[in-house]
Image (cartoon, helix red, strand yellow):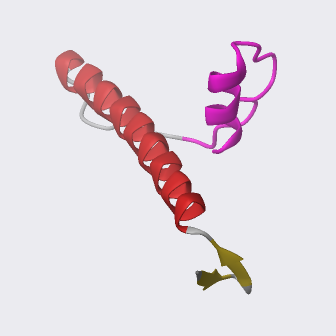
Amino acid sequence: MNIVNKTKTSRRLRKLYRIKQRRLRHAVNSMVKGIVGDASETGASKTVTRKLRGIRNNNHKGRKVDSMIHNF
């Protein structure tokens, strides 16, 4: 067992955490790729991003989507 943040973790727990991280990273990278692709198609020279305020409000799309959004 490894000790992380002064707690013991199992191999299974570490594996599940890595899987969760990879899924979230893939989702974010896919969103960024889509935004950059749309911007380059329209000929935009700059892309301005802001904080994602209000992203959790009025979101009732199911358990999987809720868990992804609340991990931001």
Q: Looking at this view, is 66 or 12 the one in front?
A: 12
Q: Is residue 14 left or right of residue 34?
A: right
* Residue 48: image location, x then y, percent: 44, 39
Q: Residue 21 colored magenta?
A: no
- Left/right of residue 56 with respect to residue 11 in the rendered view: right
Which residues make up the magenta segment? 50-72
Residue at the image position 18 percent from the left and 18 percent from the top: 41
| Rendered residue at 63%/23% (across/down) | 65
- Image-based side of 46 in relation to 7, left or right: left
Q: Which of the 4 image quarters holds residue 56? A: top right
Q: Nearer the viewer, residue 2 or 17?
A: 2
Q: Residue furthest right?
A: 58
Residue occupying the point 43% across, 39% down: 28
In the rendered image, the vertical position of residue 31 relative to residue 6, given as above or below:
above
Query: Which of 28/10 is in front?
Result: 10
Residue 53 located within the stretch drawn in magenta: yes
Q: Give the quadrant of the C terminus.
A: top right
- Counting from the top left corner in percent of width and height, residue 3 is at 63, 85
Q: Which image quadrant is residue 37 in?
A: top left
Number of marks drawn: 0
Q: Residue 38, how many percent across, how many down?
A: 28, 20
Q: Main secondary structure of the magenta part?
A: loop
Which image quadrant is residue 47 in? Answer: top left
The quarter in which the N terminus is drawn is bottom right
Q: Give the answer, above or below, for where 2 lies relative to 47.
A: below
Does residue 50 appear left or right of residue 22 in this picture?
A: right
Report the residue at 81% width, 23% height from top: 57
